Amino acid sequence: KKCVRNLMQHSPTMSKKFARSPFRWRTHFFFCPLSLNIPVLCLLLAFSSTTLTCMGFIKNDAGIESYNLGKKTNVKLFQSVQNNSNNPKPIDHESWPDKFPAKSHCSRCGLCETSYVTHVSDACAFLGEGMKRNIDGLEEIVHGRRRMVDDMVWNGISTASKANDGENENDLIAEEGRFGVMHSPMVLARGKHVSGAQWTGCVTSVAVSMLESGMVDAVICIASEENVDEDSAWSSPKPILARSVEDVMRGRGVKPALAPSLNVMDELKNIPEIQKLLFCGVGCAVQAFRAIQNELSLEEVYVLGTNCADNSPTPEDAQEFLWRSVPSIADENKKVLGYEFMQDFRVHVKYEDGNSATNVSYERMPYFSLPGNVAKFAIAESCLACFDYTNALADVVVGYMGAPLGSDSNMDQSYQTITIRNSRGAKMIQYALDAGRLELGPVASGSGSHEKIAMTTVASDNIVQEMIGGDMKEQGMPRFLGEIMATVIRSVGPKGVSFARYSLDYHLLRNYLHVIDFWGEDGRKLVPAYAKVIVEKYLKMDDSFRSLVESVRSKRR
């Protein structure tokens, strides 16, 4: 083992970074260099029944060059040696979270529930350097380049404008520093011909188009659990390996609880005719998937991601949050279809109006009127340590925080946003457009500054107050005052992409406080480079954030 570690440490040709590269490589073989340590090769042979052939010069479709050892089985050899496990045993999902490696911070992505559990130390977004390792380490491999970390908008002005001593169009649109690598600017979009979607069905439209066209053989997505009460299905996620349009349509709707997206990977492994795959998931699941992607022996892989923040640990927690936050839903026994925290500073609850899911109504509760004591049980601890709101490693990302809210503010008529990160993502969207299943609008834009409201939200957050021993609010504002507050802030506050910046910064700053509260200064090791830029900016410009950080640190002295 020591020889293996030394070889991987000192030889760039054996870089661990490329050993788990997420692409199917085009390999051009030549003879093994004599510089390789022959005893080490012998040792490797002793550990494996596979034959190490020759050293391969490899190049991915983004033009990045590296080296790999012959067949994919040799990558497995290195990782099986590293994990010292020839017969990986999945962890029983019933033992979550106590028996899972990340414990309370496990997002239950599903990886550990499969034979790929041996990769958890390199794949998990919440172990070791977690999201820093995954985002900073894989972004360039996946997209061909890393994001421009210094491309940020502050106080409504982009760094590019400051450099040019003036304003430009970059002040209004989404920037790479916060939102990740962009093949083209973030745009508005609506899905078409997807009845029963939570929004207009952008994700479903893209997935169906790819499957119908033969671009992929199967889609991994999240459907609703079938073996539950009908009134609970909206909150109960069930990963499926969809082979038909009907299966993909089962994935409509947002399930607000942790979803083990990867626990179907062993099923995928046992169906050799699946060679082209679309994986749909949130940031932490996508990170784990990218880390094992090269193990799957697939010809083509595409990843369709969604923005994500603050999921509930379990379906029951999501239901309890809703019943306590919007009591009228439970009192009137309304059949819930889903809910979202929306850009008008209200929670929108979508429910059936009558006996048909096509007839829907909405209940809207101001953020400010929500009970203060629901956040503690309703938000998973993994979500408090997440720095991948925008799903950095997906080929295409669908969200809504950067979109304008229509006059009627109904989800099923409003725009969402689409971010294309690379050429594969552009191809995915083009297939949906050609199929007539997707409608693209203008480039997403915004107005207003976001920094003060982001910091105010952080400072008043009950989770943050609990960290510093502050005053915990048990109840929210009276409903009529909350409505006034929401209306005023929506009128004068950040809109469109600027609202998305507000939401992203708020979650990032809160989560930074959480990781240094839970892990001390070691918590900083989890923070990706882009997030550190944002944290440092607030530390420099905001006294209240510096005070919060100091209060959290002082607890551990």
Image (spheres, rainbow, N blue to C red):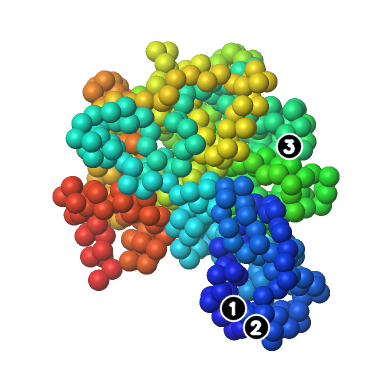
Left-right relation of 467 to 252: left
Q: Which residue is identified by label 2? A: 37
Q: Is residue 364 above or below residue 523?
A: above
Residue beneath the point at 33% across and 42% down: 151
Q: Which residue is denoted by mark 3 in the rendering?
A: 216
Q: What residue sits 23% from the left and 40% below the top?
A: 163
In the image, 255: left or right of 489?
Answer: right
Name the residue rendered at 60%, 70% in the picture.
Answer: 14
Q: Residue furthest left?
A: 543
Of helix, strand and loop, which one carries label 3? loop
Is label 2 in contact with label 3 (beta carbons under 8 Å)? Answer: no
Give amino acid for label 1.
Leu
Would you say the residues marked 2 and 1 are in contact, meaning their CB atoms lie under 8 Å apart?
yes
Residue at the spot of label 1: 7
- Give residue 22's position: percent from left, percent from top: 62, 53
Q: Quadrant of residue 121?
A: bottom right
Image x and y of residue 71, in percent: 75, 63
Question: How far is mark 2 from mark 1, CA to CA?
Answer: 8 Å
In the displayed structure, 450 sits above or below 197; it is below
Instruction: Say what amino acid the circle numbered 3 marks.
Output: Val
Q: Quick check: 485 left or right of 116?
A: left
Dot 3, crowdedness within 10 Å: few (<14), some or many (≥20)?
many
Question: Outermost residue, bottom direction?
Answer: 39
